[in-house]
Amino acid sequence: MSTRKVVVIPGDGIGTEITEAAQVVLDKVAKKAGLKLEFSLAYAGGAAIDRNGVPLPEETLSLVKNCDAVLLGAVGGPKWDSVSPDIRPEKAILGLRKALGLYANLRPIRVSEILTDYSPLKSEIVAGADILIVRELTGGIYFGEKCESETADGVEQAWDKELYSVPEISRIVRMACEAAAKRKGRVTSVDKANVLASSRLWRRVAEGTVKNYAGIELNHMYVDNCAMQLVLAPKKFDVIVTSNLFGDILSDEAAVIAGSIGMIPSASIGDGPGLYEPIHGSAPDIAGQGLANPIGTILSTAMLLRYSLNELVAADKIEQAVDKVLAKGYRTQDLYKAGLTKVSTEEMGRLVAEHI
Ligand code: NAD
């Protein structure tokens, strides 16, 4: 079996602790599955500004372009709040997305029975919800033409253009269909086709694309209705596919129903190496104290195995090990309640590894 290269970018704040914990788990599953993984360490964000003066050094770019997958902690923190805007730590994320051509962001929201009481929604509404949000990441209004200020008829105005092309829409819908084929086979395409021309094209292309996937069921939903349904009936969704702007908002809304920011992984995927990271930031308020929940990062390694290395069984093993550890009552500080067992970031990593 060939060696697969994984670049680990801890980043800043809790990034080092959570990626170390996740690497212990990845190492264990690799040993069990007979996978050969080669890890390289790279710098990005504030850590790279301190070392190299820029948030995304050339040596990091070269490593990530020549690997199979990238595992990222998080970047940023108050130490770099006053650096010049063109070298802010967050620029590293945009730079990585651009360099790797990452056009799809995948965010799974899975509410296990064990954690339903952490959700702001009632248990009976969320228990068993299992949604995958597929967000278009490189097009739409965030990257469209814009005007910061102009005067029309003596009045100041500003504008941003939402533009989607047929290839951009069809490739993200294909990604959603392929993901749905490994799940329950249902895709909900979210748009605002009653108002927006770009959404009407989105809807037409989604319908044409899904015809190529036997067994995938497509339905359409307006974004305002989707925002409501996510809190009223999250269990009715399987895969949601949507534009950059709508996906940005809906994926944060959906993350909240799972109850804890520390638990949710994400994947950004293109045609080359994928980038895997938890959805939270660098949490400078708890950095270096062993308080961070590493499960979002650990579950990101499961996505890495599934989507970049095509190691589906190994990915399932990680997710099952996380469930087992939670079922036994182990919790990091963020999810701790009386009667449970409080563990550090490092201990949580070791426990998950032991349950594989
Ligand atoms: P944050 O996600 O870092 O933290 C928000 C709150 O959630 C904090 O109270 C934090 O302690 C808690 N938290 C986050 N992750 C946790 C975990 N794994 N375990 C337990 N608790 C956790 O958001 P923020 O405070 O707004 O941002 C901090 C820094 O992170 C900023 O510099 C921001 O720009 C950056 N950031 C980076 C990314 C990224 O790298 N992708 C994403 C978001 C924010």
Image (tube, rainbow, N blue to C red):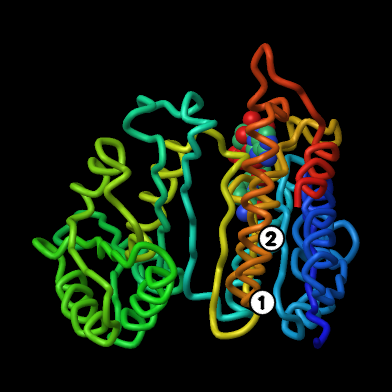
Residue 174 location (% of width, % of height): 36, 80
From the image, tell me which residue sits under label 1. 309
* Number of marks in the rendered image: 2
Residue 250 location (% of width, % of height): 36, 50
Name, please, the residue furthest toward the left. Answer: 194
From the image, tell me which residue sits under label 2. 301
Q: Amino acid at mark 1?
A: Leu
Question: In this rendering, would 72 be left or right of 249?
Answer: right
Foreground pick, 294 / 25: 25
Q: Is mark 2 within 8 Å of ligand 1?
A: no
Foreground pick, 33 / 268: 33
Provide the secondary structure element on which disc 1 rests: loop
Q: Quadrant of residue 335?
A: top right
Say which residue appears at 80% left-offset and 28% top-offset. Answer: 343
Question: In this rendering, would 342 be left or right of 112?
Answer: right
Q: Amino acid at mark 2?
A: Thr
Provide the secondary structure element on which disc 2 rests: helix
Residue 178, placed above or below residue 8? below
Residue 298 location (% of width, % of height): 70, 52
